[in-house]
Amino acid sequence: MSDHDLGTSGRARWAARGTWIAVEALIPLLLLVAWGAWSATANSFYFPPLTDILSSFRTTWLFARFGSDVVPSLLRLFAGYAAAVVVGIPLGALLGLSPLALRTTRPVIEFVRSIPPSALIPFGIVVLGLGNAMKVFVIALACLFPVLLNTVDGVRGIDPVARETSRMYGIGAVDHVRGVVLPAATPRIAAGLRTSLALALTLTVITEMAASTNGIGYFILQAQRSFPIPEMWSGMLLLGLLGYLLNAGFALLERRLLAWHRGARGTG
Amino acid sequence: MSVPLLEVVRLSKTYDAGARTTTALGEVSFWVDRGEFLCIVGPSGCGKTTLLKCMAGLLRPSAGQVRLGQREVVRPPREMALVFQQYERSLYPWMTVRRNVRFPLKHRRLPRVEAGRLVEEAVEAVGLTEFIDHYPWQLSGGMQQRVALARALAYRPEILLMDEPFASVDAQTRAELEDLALRIRRDFGITVVFVTHDIDEAIYLGDRVIVLTPSPARVHEIVTIDLPEPRDQLTTKGAPRFIDLRARLYTAIARWRRPATSATPG
Amino acid sequence: MGLAAILGFLEALSRLGVVDPRSFPPISEDVGALVLQLPDLAFWEAVAATLEGWALGLGVAVALAVPLGILLGSLPPADHALRAVIEFLRPIPSVALIPLAILLYGLGVTSEVFLVAFASFWPLLIQTLYGVRDVDPVALETSRAFGDSWPRRAGRIVLPSALPYLATGLRIASATALILAVTAELIIGSPGLGREIEVARSAGAYSLMYGLIIATGVLGWGLDTVLDRTERQVLHWHPLHRGAEAAS
C-alpha cells in the first residue's frame, strides 16, 4: 500500500485503517468491562466481581504460587511436548517415506489415536504411578499423533519431481531427506506442532486434575473443592492466558520460519 | 567423425499394470554427437519424456540401452543434468536462487570458494545476477526457468537434457529463453538434447531434429538442420530454408494428426 | 496383516513375562474381559451415558455455532471485530472450565454436556465462518441480481457451498466432544466409560480396565467412521472442495 500521494484519499485510507484497529482492540476490552460491571453488581457466589478475580490473580500467580504450580505445569507440558516431537517427526518421516511401513502400522495408529487421551490416564497410572513420569507420558502420547500424522502427510505430499531432481544430481538419500523432504514438509509439520501444543496444555491440566499434588490443574480443582472461588477463577484466567500466549508465540515463530511458504503460496 | 558422445540403442519401455501393458517407447535408436544441439519432436504423449528419463538414467529401459561413451547408463551419470518442464515443482521455495543453484554441488564436496564461483557464473550466464538472493516465487515464470537452467549449469554437465522447458511460458519469454539456450551451448560447450512439441522451436534451435512417431514411439526420421549460425529470431525464422524444413516436418507429423480416433493422450 | 503381527507381539510380551503381566495383562485377556462385559447391562448403560454426553453437548454446540457462524460470516464488519475475540478465546483449554462446571452443575451429566458443548463450539464456529466466507462471490452477486431475498440467498447459495466446511468442523468437533466427555467422566465422575475405566483401575481389575479403554477406542473410531461415511454420502455431489483446514 504505497501512500506516496498522501492527499485526501490517502489520509482517508489511513483513518479507515486506524478505525479497524481500534475496533479490533476495543471489542475485547468492552467485553471485559461488561463482564466486570455485571459481576460487580450480580452478587453471585459463583461469579465473583472481576476486580476480586484480578486481585486474586495478582496475589496468587505473581509470584506466590508461580514456582510451586506454574513451573511444574510448564515443565511437564514442555517435556511431554518435546518427547512427542522428538519421536513423532522422525517416525513420521520414516512412515511417510515407506509405504509398506505405513500400511503395516496404520491400523494400530488409527486405533490408538481414536482412544480419548483421558482414557489412557488410568493406564498411565497403572504403569507409571502417580508422579511426573505418568503425566509426561500421557501428554507425550496424546501429542504424538497430530505430529506423527501431519509429518506423514507432509512427507507423502512431496512432489515426485523433487526426488528425481535429487537423483539427477546425485544427492544421496540422507541429504535428500534432510535437505529436501523435511523442509518441504515443514508447513504440514508446523500445523501438527501447533495442534499438539494446544493438546499439551489440555492434557497437562487433565493429568494434574486426575492425579497430582501440584500444578495449575491441581490448583483450580482444589480451589473449587475448598471454595476459594476467586482463586479458582484466577487459575482459569491463567490457563486462558497461557493458552493464548503459547498459541501466539508459536504463531510468531511459524511466521518467521515459514515466510517462504506464504510467499510461494501467494504467487501460486 | 569421432565416437558419438551418447548412444541410444534399441531402447524400448513397456509398463506392466497387471492385465494391461502400455508401450511407452517402441524401439528407438539414435546417437548424439559431442557439442551438438539435438532436438526431439513428437506429438503429445508419444513418450518423449520417457525417452529422456531413460537417457538420464532415471528410468530403466525394458530393452536396449543407453551408452555414454563406453559405459552403459544405469543410474543418473555425473555428466548429465536434466531440466524439467515444471520449474515451480523442481525449484525449492525455501531456498534463495543462490542456494537453489548451489544445491546440486553439495555432494561434490568442492571448496566453498569454488562452489560459490560456479554458482555466480551460472546465475550470470542466465542473466539473473541481480536476483541471486531472491526467492523463486518472487520471480516470474520465465525467470524461474532460468534459475532451473542455472542450477543445471553450475553442475557443469557434459550433456544437458531439457524436457519441454519452455512450454509453460509466454511466447515472448520463450523466444528469449531459446536464445539463452543457444548462448549457453556456445559459451559452455555443452551438448544439449532438447525435447519439444513445438516444431518451429526445434528447427530454430537444433543442429538435428529427431521426429518420433506417436505412441509407441519410434524414430520416424532424423533431419539435419542446415541453417546458418548464429541463429536469430527474426532472420532465421524468415529464411526460405526454415520454411522448407518446417514444411517437411509438418508434413511428416500431419500424417498422424488426422485420425482423431487415435488416442489423444494428455 | 501388520495389525496381527503387532497384536501377536504385544500378546507375547505379556505372556512371556517381559512386561509385568499384572500391569499388562495379555491382549487376549483384555479383549476377553471386554467381551465378558457385553451381555452386562451396566456396560451398555455406561456406553449410552458417554454417548449421551457426547450427543447433547455436540447438539448444543451445533445449535449455537452454526447460526452464529453464518451470521458472523456474512457481516464483514462484525467478522473483523469478532476475530480478535475468537482468537483470544479459542486457545483457552476447555478443561480449565471443569471447576466451573462442577460448581454450576454438580457432578452429573449436565456438567459433562456443558464442557463438551464449550469445547466443540469453537471448531464448529470457525469452520462455519470459513465456509461462509469461502462462498463464490459471483454466485452471490448473481442471486442478488435476480432479486433473491437474504434468507433465500443463505439457503440456496451459502449453505450448500459451506457444507463441506461444516462437515469437517463436525468431524473435528465430534472427536473433541468425545475426548471431553470421557475426560469429564474420568475427572468429575459423571456416568460413562471414563468413570468405569477409573473404577476398574482403582479396583485393580486391570484386564477390565484395558478392555474398557479398547472399547473407548472402538467407540471413537466408530463415530468417526460413521461421520465420514455420512459425509461422503451427503456431499457426494460436491466437487470435493475439502480444502477446509482450520489451520491458523
Image: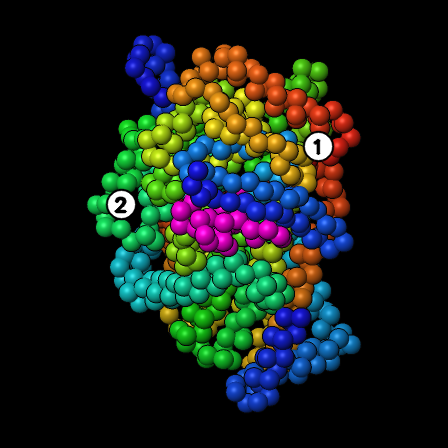
Say which of B20 and C19 sits in front.
B20
Amino acid type assigned to the residue bearing label 2 in the image = Ala
The disc numbered 1 marks a residue on which chain?
Answer: B
Give the image location of residue C237, x and y in percent.
74, 38
Return the mark for residue B115: 2
Residue A72, by quadrant, is bottom left
- Magenta region: B52-80
Q: In which quarter of the image is residue C243?
A: top right
- Can you name the residue that lies furthest to the front here? B1
B204 displayed left or right of A235: right
Does residue B63 appear in the picture of this structure? yes
On the image, the x and y values in percent for residue B147 come to 38, 34
Horizontal and vertical percent position of residue A193: 44, 54
> Does the magenta run of residues contain B56?
yes
Residue at point 53%, 49% (across, down) = B66
Secondary element at tag 1: loop
- On residue B264, the disc is 1
Question: Local crowd at mark 2 within 10 Å, few (<14), some, or many (≥20)?
Answer: some
* Other-residue count near label 1 (Cα within 10 Å), few / some / many at <14 / 14–19 / ≥20: some
Q: Determine if the magenta segment contains residue A110.
A: no
Is there any visible trace of residue C95 in the rendered image? Answer: no
Who's the residue at 68% across and 38% down the image?
B215
